[in-house]
Image: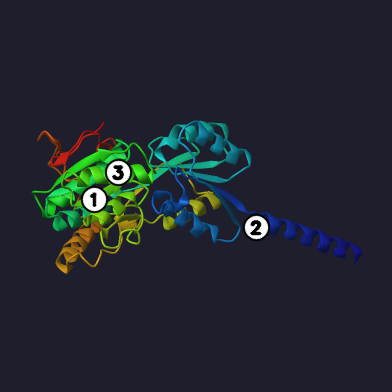
């Protein structure tokens, strides 16, 4: 009996130990380039973070307003040293610092948003925001009276240039006379500077303001002048309800759940992921009441075509500013889109 009792106790100890091991919390870190209260890009990522934070046995931390470059490298190193299992870096300029850190900590999974480099334990991911940009361009093209659309843009990198081009193509699809004027702020999040950028476009006749910025500054500038605006990242209508037509938006929660589960069950593999409307990573916010029903119906019909693949945003021929054909294929190669450094015909501005 004594031997049986000892064996029962030992088996109970082993079972408890196994259960505790199974219940060990997974540590996940997020690093943002702007404050989560920006109502824009970082806020959209943080909504995804909050979704996985609600799961059992997951410990989630985030750091906001982390500068690209050396500052981000220190943050990644600190998280890795604290034995985080999974680390997300959500800005383009985090790419090289994250790659450098990943090489030093091979047992941590690193995920970089909007970049193109990877390693054995570092993957990259982004969304085909250009699809939603195209749709928002359709709305802008239908609503403009001056045929001048302003675009307040962050940095002249392929991600931003691709979005501007898609927006212009969408506008031209419903209004061939529409042109897109671009101003660069060289900021991701600077509300005052981004608002001033919008004002400079309004001064040259733009009556719809779009943006690739994290703040609602451009939206506010548009409302103050009594014209329309196109938001970005999230539904920004609360900041400019009289101006806000629509916004291309992010929905990161399903993807973050997918990555988390793959790391948990050991199926995660490094690679590149570029999901779009079909996977639900990008979409449109509700359109404002000022948008006519006919316009809404046209845009939503094209949205369905993009989702099913029957319409391709950059399907050739696509001409650049000089009128030269730059894309010829009906379905262009992703490499051409990911390296885009030229503007389509109808965009006024430089890629510098």
Does 8 sit above or below residue 115? below
User: Of tags 1 and 2, which is closer to the observer?
Assistant: 1
- Quarter of the image where one finds residue 201: top left
Around disc 3, counting alpha carbons within 10 Å, would you say few (fewer than 14), some (14 to 19), or many (20 or more)? Answer: some
Sooner in the amino-acid sequence: mark 1 or mark 3: 3
Sooner in the amino-acid sequence: mark 1 or mark 2: 2
How far apart are the alpha carbons under marks 1 and 3?
12 Å
Residue contact at pointers 1 and 3, CB within 8 angstroms: no
Local SS, label 3: helix
Does 210 sit above or below residue 286? above
Pointer 1 residue: 209
- Number of residue marks: 3
- Quarter of the image where one finds residue 107: top right
Local SS, label 1: strand
**From the viewer's perspective, is 57 left or right of 152?**
right
Query: What is the quadrant of the C terminus in the image?
Result: top left
Around disc 1, counting alpha carbons within 10 Å, would you say few (fewer than 14), some (14 to 19), or many (20 or more)? Answer: many
User: Of tags 3 and 2, which is closer to the observer?
Assistant: 3
**From the viewer's perspective, is 89 left or right of 130?**
right
How far apart are the alpha carbons under marks 3 and 2?
51 Å
**From the viewer's perspective, is 7 left or right of 18?**
right
Residue 311, percent from left and from top: 18, 54
User: Of tags 1 and 3, which is closer to the observer?
Assistant: 3
Query: What is the quadrant of the N terminus in the image?
Result: bottom right
How far apart are the alpha carbons under marks 1 and 2?
50 Å
Sooner in the amino-acid sequence: mark 3 or mark 2: 2
Q: Residue at x 46, y 35 (%)?
A: 119
Q: Residue at x 50, y 36 (%)?
A: 72
Q: How is the image coloured?
A: rainbow
Pointer 3 residue: 196
Give me the disc on residue 23. 2
User: Foreground: 215 or 261?
Assistant: 215
């Amino acid at each position: 009996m004594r031997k049986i009792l000892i064996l029962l106790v030992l088996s109970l100890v082993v079972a408890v130990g196994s259960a505790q091991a199974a219940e060990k919390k997974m540590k996940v870190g997020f690093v943002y380039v702007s404050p989560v209260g920006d109502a824009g890009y970082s806020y959209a990522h943080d909504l995804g973070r909050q979704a996985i934070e609600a799961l059992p046995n997951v410990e989630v931390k985030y750091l906001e307003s982390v500068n690209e470059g050396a500052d981000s490298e220190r943050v990644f190193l600190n998280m890795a040293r604290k034995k985080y299992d999974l680390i997300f870096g959500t800005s383009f300029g985090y790419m090289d610092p994250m790659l450098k850190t990943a090489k030093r900590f091979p047992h941590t999974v690193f995920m970089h948003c909007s970049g193109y480099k990877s390693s054995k334990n570092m993957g990259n991911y982004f969304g085909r925001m250009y699809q939603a940009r195209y749709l928002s361009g359709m709305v802008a093209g239908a609503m403009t009276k001056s045929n001048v659309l302003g675009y307040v843009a962050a940095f002249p990198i392929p991600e931003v240039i691709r979005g501007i081009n898609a927006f212009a193509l969408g506008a031209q699809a419903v209004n061939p006379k529409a042109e897109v004027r671009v101003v660069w702020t060289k900021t991701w999040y600077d509300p005052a500077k981004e608002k001033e950028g919008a004002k400079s476009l309004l001064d040259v006749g733009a009556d719809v303001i779009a943006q690739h910025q994290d703040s609602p500054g451009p939206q506010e500038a548009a409302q103050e002048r009594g014209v329309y605006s196109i938001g970005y990242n999230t539904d920004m209508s609360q900041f400019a309800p009289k101006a806000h037509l629509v916004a291309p938006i992010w929905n990161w929660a399903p993807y973050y759940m997918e990555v988390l589960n793959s790391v948990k069950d050991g199926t995660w593999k490094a690679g590149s992921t570029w999901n779009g409307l079909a996977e639900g990573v990008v979409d449109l916010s509700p359109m404002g009441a000022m948008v006519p029903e006919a316009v809404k119906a046209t845009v939503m019909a094209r949205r369905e075509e993009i989702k099913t693949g029957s319409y391709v945003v950059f399907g050739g021929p696509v001409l650049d500013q000089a009128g030269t054909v730059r894309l010829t294929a009906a379905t262009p190669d992703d490499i051409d889109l990911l390296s885009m450094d030229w503007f389509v015909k109808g965009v006024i501005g430089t890629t510098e």
